[in-house]
Image (cartoon, rainbow, N blue to C red):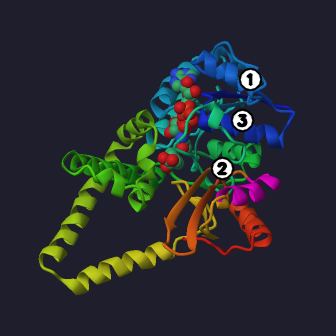
Amino acid sequence: MQKSVLILGLGLIGGSIALSIKQEYPQVSIIGYDRDENTLKAAKKLGVIDDKAESIVAAEEADYIIFSTPVIQTLELMNQISTLSLKRDVIITDVGSTKGSIAAEGERLFTGSNGVFVGGHPMAGSHKSGVTAARARLFENAFYILTPTSKESAEAAEKLKVLLKGTNAHFIDLDPQQHDSLTGVISHFPHVIAAGLVRQAEILQESQPLTSRLAAGGFRDITRIASSNPAMWRDILLQNKEELLKLFQQWQGEMDYVRTMIEEEDAAKIYTYFLEAKQFRDGLPVKTKGAIPAFYDLYVDVPDYPGIISEITGYLAEEEISITNIRIIETREEIYGVLRLSFQSEADRMRAQRCIETKAKYDTFFME
Ligand SMILES: NC(=O)C1=CN([C@@H]2O[C@H](COP(=O)(O)OP(=O)(O)OC[C@H]3O[C@@H](n4cnc5c(N)ncnc54)[C@H](O)[C@@H]3O)[C@@H](O)[C@H]2O)C=CC1
Ligand SMILES: O=C(O)C(=O)Cc1ccc(O)cc1
């Protein structure tokens, strides 16, 4: 493919898209634009882009334009770019976490004589940001939603899937409103709840200093997404306001229901509530990535002796398997402890399991 791709915003997502395109099509020319000069320099130095664009006017040469900026800036940049002399058949897309207003603006601004717009959202990420966190494999097995709104944009979506083949993502076409309603429930609202739980603990911490020490285990895990980028989530909530307001109402009803069951000490109803939640949760697919990044954790039953961590990490290093986190979960009084290793992908976790079971002969297990 001898095409030129302009990526605006070279952070975690823009950088990862650039790397995945380059991996599949080395001959494609990737031009990067970012308002932060240091990011641009880093992107060039890390080989994420082939060339730096001095200004957004570089869009006039592009066959594909990908907005990878925060959602509010994407709307502003789309307006600026639409006033340039773009190639007639340029395909324009974005990666924003919200789609309603971006897709509507894309359809209004790009009318066929100055390119065609199709909204996009790769549903994988991390709480990290910036070009240094970019990875070609970030979107592997993740859902990548495209939101075509016309026959022309549906055709553009098919071409985009070819360009983005190297993401190894699963593409799904959705209506923009349907996208916002779904991601509201499974991504945006959970970020509000996670932040709310953390703030509740923070208030208790003032009178009970033990709180943060006790919160170090499971609480820390279920509130992990509260460590996400605050500016990004502020913008996402503001752009998905209508859906979120509906969800607040529904959630308040849900919490009232739980509170009443407890007030009335209705044991049977409380049991059914948890049982039904467990059944739905246990039925969720495990092989694909969802909106919120999965934990690729492997638990290893290890004898509790000095040097055990370096023994295990040594075996993994021999096979060049990278660990993103390591922690002793619980050291039982006697002989065995549980070591939790976290990996970047399911493939790394599977390789690590084979490696440890073969070389060290320790039992390993997953907790889904
Ligand atoms: N972080 C995540 O996990 C995911 C994020 N997204 C979406 O991807 C988009 C980008 O997010 P990240 O890559 O995480 O952010 P990031 O903070 O890592 O990167 C954003 C980049 O855009 C640049 N930028 C900001 N305003 C600009 C402007 N006006 N002109 C040029 N460059 C500008 C920044 O300098 C930065 O390099 C957002 O719209 C977000 O909703 C989508 C899926 C996952
Ligand atoms: O790490 C997090 O906070 C995530 O939940 C990752 C993420 C962030 C934004 C998206 O639109 C999709 C996935």
Residue at mark 3? 18
Q: Residue at 76% across / 47% down in the picture?
A: 166
Residue 297 has which mark? Answer: none
Q: Residue at 25% across / 66% down in the picture?
A: 254
Is 173 or 198 nearer to us in this picture?
Answer: 198
Stretch in magenta: 309-321
Please tell me how many numbered marks the rendered image carries.
3
**Mark 1 vs mark 2: in front:** 1
- Left or right of 223? Residue 206 is left
Residue at mark 2? 139
Earlier in the chain: of badge 2 and badge 3, it is 3
- Left or right of 107? Residue 89 is right
Q: In which quarter of the image is the N terminus?
A: top right
* Measured Cα–Cα span from mark 1 to mark 3: 11 Å
Main secondary structure found in the magenta portion? helix
- Say if disc 3 is inside 8 Å of ligand 1: no
Earlier in the chain: of badge 1 and badge 3, it is 3
Q: Residue at 68% across / 23% down in the picture?
A: 42
Residue at mark 1? 44
Callout 2 touching callout 3 (CB < 8 Å): no
* Measured Cα–Cα span from mark 1 to mark 2: 21 Å
